[in-house]
Structures are given as C-alpha cells and as structure tokens.
Amino acid sequence: MERDHITNDDEGKAVVDSHGEKVGMITEVKSGTAYVDADPGLTDTIRSKLGWGDADQDDYPLEKNRVHTVTDDEVRLKDEF
C-alpha cells in the first residue's frame, strides 16, 4: 500500500531518490516531520527499526512536499525541480 505522508511507523525506512538510489534513513518522526540520517551506521539502523531512534544534529528534516510515495520498505522522494 502506498501513501504520500510520513507516520511514526516509518522510522528505520530507507529514503531513496526518484531513481531508487538510497540517500539515507529515517531516524525519527517528530510532530509529523521525518528526520533523515544521510550516513546511518549499523547501530543507527537497528535502533530506528526497533523504534529507539532519536534525531541528532547530523540529521536533516525532510520537507513534506519532497515525499513522492511511502511504501512498506522505503520513502521515495520526488524529482528535484
């Protein structure tokens, strides 16, 4: 099932560009905003998948208008303008 918005359940998902290239991972969703780690390590990946994620100063907020689709496995971004 695809959708175009982020929820708390999306923590730990890969973020991919419009060509399917992985660009990061959602580490935390806070107040409807997803935070993306562009270079997650194994520990970050495991913590996020367990729901223990916590955004830090190296994570970037993902603007809602950049999300194309959210699937069970990934968050796909729109083409850049």
Image (spheres, rainbow, N blue to C red):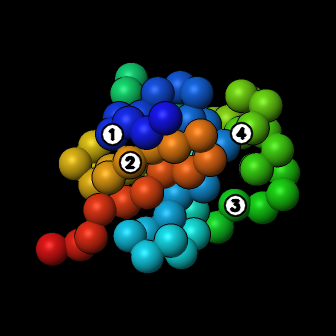
| Kind of residue at badge 3 | Pro
Q: On residue 48, which mark appears?
A: 4
- Where residue 40 sits, quadrant-wise, is bottom right
Give x and y (percent) for residue 75.
Answer: 48, 51
**Mark with earlier residue (4, 1):** 1
Alpha carbon separation for disc pair 3 and 1: 23 Å
Q: Amino acid at mark 2?
A: Thr
- Dot 2 surroundings within 10 Å: few (below 14), some, or many (20 or more)? some
User: Element type at marker 1?
Assistant: loop
Tell me what residue is drawn at x 29 percent, y 62 percent: 78
x and y, in percent, of residue 54 in the image: 63, 36
Whether residue 46 can be seen here: yes
33 lies above or below 66: above
Disc 2 + disc 1, Cβ < 8 Å: yes
- The C terminus, quarter of image: bottom left
What percent of the width, then of the height, locates residue 4?
Answer: 33, 39
Q: Which mark is residue 4?
A: 1
Q: Residue furthest left?
A: 81
Q: Earlier in the sequence, mark 4 or mark 3?
A: 3
* Residue designated by label 2: 69
Q: Within 10 angstroms of label 3, few (less than 14), some, or many (20 or more) residues?
A: many
Dot 4 and dot 3 residues touching (CB under 8 Å): yes
